[in-house]
Image: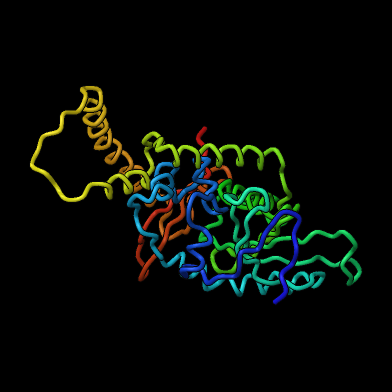
Amino acid sequence: MAAIETPTGVLLGRFEPGSPEWEQARGGLVVTATEIAAVMSLSPWQSRFSLWHKKAGLPTPPFEVTPAVEWGNRLEVAVAQKWMEEHQDTEDVEPAGTWRHSDRPWQIATPDQIFMPLTGWMIAPGQLPQLLEVKTSPFGDGWGPDGSDEIPVHYRCQIQWQLDTLGLKTCHVALLVSGHDYREYRIEYDQADAELMRKAAREFLDDVAAGIRPPIDSSDATHQTIRRQPEGREDVDVEIPGPLRDRYFTALDGSKAATAELLGAKSQVLDAIGNGRRAVCLGETVATRTVRDGKTHSLQPAKNRSTT
């Protein structure tokens, strides 16, 4: 398969995700498109703290292949095929592979697909390749209407990093929501965002090289990373400062009250929904009720929510 040329991208190869070759191409002191959101503290899966430990070669929680991840991977081919059926004005839609920037070898991207758009069934002179990203979502939280450029911010970071790495201007996104709601988005390159992320990534890698650890935040990724650092246990007492003790005890007391309040609120919302699917207020989704074997399984809050 002949590689499509890009202005600033150097193709490292097309590797099976998770293979030793794939890991090697993305390893070391580099920032990939799936990691840049964590560098910017915008990732729902990684924190800047957890990514720093990974890059420093320290223990981090293993990647978990959840049912959502598994089925997202399985459906990717079908969703990409749907996009290609809707867009016959393309040439050579193919797996993009793993790329690095020609002048910044620490900038890595592995887009889903790359293709040449056609003009009158021909490739126009000077025409740049374009990218296609395929996503799935259970509820569509954070995704705007079909045809817009409203996508979750962590995916926007990923796409801007891909475009900046390869020197391209346009990325299309094919999304499948709830297994049946197909949508398309078009994202254009934003130079200001790219420069901001580049600067943050370079500073992050410099901190890794210098051993400067990021501050501890309140994310689960950071908590799970800290849990994996100690090896074994010594029967010793460790003195901690008074303010840290007070913060811990205050948080414990507050969490008990918050847990009780949340449980009561969830019960009232579920009671109001009855056998319905969603709770809405003034046209906006508040929460979604999931069902297993005919009974309520869980109440999933909307990610984008507001109070009045």
**Residue placed most toward the observer, 158 or 253:** 158
Which quadrant of the structure image shows residue 173? Answer: bottom right
Q: Is residue 22 left or right of residue 111?
A: left
Q: Is the image coloured rainbow, by chain, by secondary structure, or in one colour?
A: rainbow
Q: Where is 290 relative to 143, above or below?
A: below
Question: At 39% across and 34% down in the image, what residue appears?
Answer: 215
Question: At 74% across and 67% down in the image, what residue appears?
Answer: 4
Q: Position of residue 9 (x, y in %)?
A: 69, 57
Q: Is residue 223 left or right of residue 240?
A: right
Question: At 43% across and 57% down in the image, what residue appears?
Answer: 289
Q: Position of residue 208 (x, y in %)?
A: 44, 41
Q: Where is 153 relative to 76, above or below?
A: above
Residue extending furthest toward the top: 242
Residue extending furthest toward the bottom: 1
Q: Position of residue 291 (x, y in %)?
A: 39, 64
Q: Where is 33 relative to 83, above or below?
A: above
**Residue placed most toward the observer, 129 or 80:** 129
**Residue placed most toward the observer, 118 or 6:** 6
Q: Is residue 129 left or right of residue 30?
A: right
